[in-house]
Structure formats: C-alpha cells, structure tokens
Image (tube, rainbow, N blue to C red):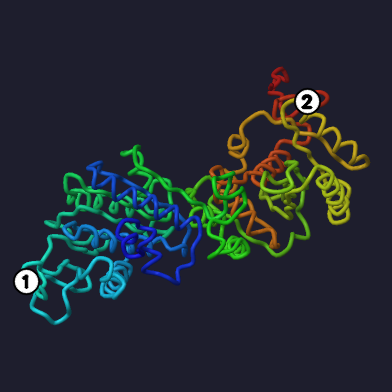
Amino acid sequence: MARSEARQSFYSFRCHMRPEMVRGWWLKEISEHLERFYYRFMNGERPKLVLMAPPQHGKTTIVTDLIAWVAGKNPNLKCLFTSYSDDLGQGVNVALQRMMDSDRFKQVFGSRLPAFGRAVEGMRNSNLLEYVGDNPHNPGVPSAYKGSFRNTTVNGQVTGKGLDFGFIDDPIKGRREANSLTVRDATWAWLTDDFFTRFSDHAALLMTLTRWHLDDPAGRFLQKFPETVVLDYPAIATREEKHRKKGDPLFPEFKSLEFLEERRRGLSQASWVSLYQQSPIIAGGGMFPIEKFSVVNALPSKGVMKTVRYWDKAATEMGGAYTAGVKMVKLDNGTFIVTDVRRAQMGALQREQMILQTAQLDRQESGPNVLTVIEQEPGSGGKDSAEASIRMLAGYKVEADKVTDAKHVRADPYAAQVQAGNVAILAGQWNKEFLNEHETFPNGVYLDTVDAAAGAFAKLTLGSSYRSNMDWVGDVPPNILNQQGAVRIW
C-alpha cells in the first residue's frame, strides 16, 4: 500500500524514501504544490513555479526527490538541472544515483539507471544519467528510455540538449555577484539564450533560489512571466498565515525560532531579509554607502560646536517601528559625528521614560546646551504627543520639529554629507544596527534611525529655529536676508 501511494503521491513518495525525514506542515504543503506542478505539466499547461525559502530548509533535497519521482513515473522525460556551482549539480547527481539504486525506489518504480560496468544502452556519469528499465520482451535485459537527467552550471554547455523539465537552483552565488550588473546580465543572457531555448513545446520550469537582488533572474523572469506561481516562505512569518501566526518560524520541527533569531543577530539586515525572509534589498553603494562612514574611538577634545539629540517616536512594543534617538555633533571643521543611538520597541510609557533618562545622561556628558528635538508627526495626535514630551522635559533645552516631507526626501542633505565622507560614528555597540539600517534605506524594514539621524543633521546645519514646514520661531533670522535686507524665505 505504501509503494502504491508513493507512485501516486509525491509526499507519500518522500515519506517512503526517507522514513527518517523530519516532518511538518511546510514539507507537506511544498510536496503537494510540486505534485500539482507535475500534473499541470502532464496536462500541457507549461507550468512555471518559483520557490523561495530560507537556507538549510531542504529546498535542494525536495528538488532531488521530485526529479527521482518524475523519473519513476515517466522515464521518457528529459530533465536539466543548473546552478552557479558544479559541485551542487554533481551533488544532486550523486544523490539521485543513490536513491534510484536503492531497494526502496526499485520496489516502487523498478530500475531506472544502468548498472556500472555493463554495456547497455545508457550513460551514467557525474553529469548525465540516462534512464533504462526492464525489457518486457526480454526479462533481465535492460532497455533504454528516452529520458535523462543532466546537470550543468550557469554558462555551461547545453546546446543541442532538449529538455522537458528545467530546474534552476540558485543561479547566482551570493551578494557580491548579485550586486554586479555585469554578472546579472551575463546570467540572464545565458538563461534566455541557452537554457530557455532548450525547452520542448510543453516544458515546465522550477526555479529555487535566494533573492539577493530585486533585479536578479527571478525578478526579471517574474516581470516577463507574471503568470508564474510564486511560493514565498519567510523564515519568520511577517503576517497571519494559514498554518502559523505572525512571528512563528517556518519549520519549527527542524529550525527553531531561537535558532533563527541567533542567525538574525549575526547577519546584516540586508542579508537577513534576503536569505531568510525572501525580501531582496539593493544594499551597498546606494543612498548611504556605509563604507563612507569612518569610525572614531573618541570625540576630539576641542572643536565641538553643537550637539543635538533627535527623537523619532513610535509606540509599538513588538514587531512594529522603533523609537530611535540619535545624538550627533557638528565640529568646527564642517564634519559631523554620530555619538550615540538609542533604539527600542516599547510602549508609550516606557518610551517617555527612556527619553527623559537619555536627556539626563546627555546633560551629564555634554552639558546643558544639548538640544533635544522631538519629531512631530502630522495631525493632532502627533502634536499632542510632541507637546507631552516637551512638558516632561521641562528644564531641558527642547523643541518639536513638525515634519511634512517623505523620509527619503528629508534624508537627502544628510546622505550627501555621508557620501562625501563627512560623517563619522563613535565606536559603540549600536554601530551594527545603525549601519544595517543605513545600508538598506529606503527599502529596508526599518527607517527610524536614519530618520532620526537626518533630523539631527538638519538641526545642526539649519539652526534650532528651523521647522521643516518652513515656519520660523520669532523674528526672521538675519542670515536669510539678502544684501538689501528685503527677502524672507518661506
């Protein structure tokens, strides 16, 4: 009964072939999707499927099992597997040979591979497996089928090799290659000019990969073929799903939430959201090239002209935006140093306590002239929140900053100085998250620290009487009058 089910059901085949396999809802759901993928092919629908899932969750093993199952069900089909690495393709080749040589496989589908060292109609090496089977007219003598499995690499030779199933597994090696337009163009040219042109009339395509870049092969393919089925599985759920709640791991039986959070702490935000969350971000060399930040071990003993702590407030305890307070100084040589960052997800009461405690520490460290600025969001709620913080900070130098423009617009002047190498950061534990958020801005998950840094920069360069909605406190400052003293800037 198990062998009969394995012939019909891909998930049953996997369970039969891998009795030790760690099981969970995710593996069952993926197996059911891939089974439908095969039957859609058999119906002549030319199916296209993109599978995106975290590393070490068994994507390549699932693809290997699917190739074996397809070979068992229809050994006249030709499959071509490609990846950035020849080792990966040969690893799949070896795994297929071991599986299809096993008694379990033969009990389900019979022989599919020629024996080593026998003169039969079929090739068997590290790059090609040609399928054979028992000859019903001459028992014990293998006969050749038309199907095969071939593995190659991106940019490898495929001319003249037709295919019914195309498998693309990680066509780009990593972030460095993904960030290279030359590599992306060359990879896409090979896929379109060599790989895709080998497809038979009814061929199917399965692509499994890590989304390193918005313009990677999957991104380009989905633009060209929007009807493609996309299976997108982040390691930690970002919303309520059928089988898990927001914040739950994808495959807890195999990779726990604690394990994933440990991986998250060791990665940059760009790497985490690409590798584990399937959300590609253009990182490095963007609006904030993080290599332009220099790190200093101490503030200079002289030359600090102004000090500002700017707060971008949020009121979410878990999973939402951060409250971020960035402290920045301006030096008399025209450069800037970020000296401290406070960043946390917390409720309104804890947030206000943190702002007050930070103001006390800033006064102790930098003196009474430190300006604390509270960002005032549009609307009456934003005004009330800013005014409440100002009342709490009675006795401190504090003001509200009404904002109207989008975050990336407000960040432009600050970004220009970063790009020019005029902004440094003081060495501290907060450096990693600060740089991560800048590297992915404005495409990253969180924008709060950059927004606070841009606000602090604006206050240091435009003066404490400036408001981003172009209002002024008091009389017109003399530095905005022209030589005739007659022009007021609004």
Name the residue rendered at 33%, 44% in the picture: 221
Extreme residue in the top direction: 486
Q: Horizontal placement of 388 versus 414: left or right?
A: right
Residue 52, given in percent of the width and then of the height, sits at: 43, 52
The mark that comes first in sequence, 2 or 1, is 1
Number of residues whose C-alpha sits closer than 10 Å to that of mark 2, classed few (under 14), some (14–19) or many (20 or more): few
Q: Nearer the viewer, residue 15 or 333?
A: 15
Compared across the picture, whether 103 is left or right of 444 comes to left
Can you tell which quarter of the image residue 468 is in?
top right
Q: Residue furthest right?
A: 395
Q: Position of residue 397 (x, y in %)?
A: 87, 41
Identify the element where label 2 is drawn: helix
Q: Nearer the viewer, residue 106 or 341?
A: 106
Which residue, given by chain and number where applicable, does mark 1 sit on? 138
Q: Is residue 328 above or below residue 45?
A: below
333 and 66: which is toward the camera: 66
Going by the numbered disc 2, the residue's amino acid type is: Ser
The kind of residue tagged 1 is: Asn
Which residue in the structure is indicated by mark 2?
Answer: 380
Residue at (17% x, 80% y) in the render: 116
Q: Is residue 193 left or right of residue 278?
A: left
Residue 409, percent from left and from top: 59, 34
Name which residue lies at 39% across and 55% down. 31
Residue 454 in percent (x, y) is at 66, 42
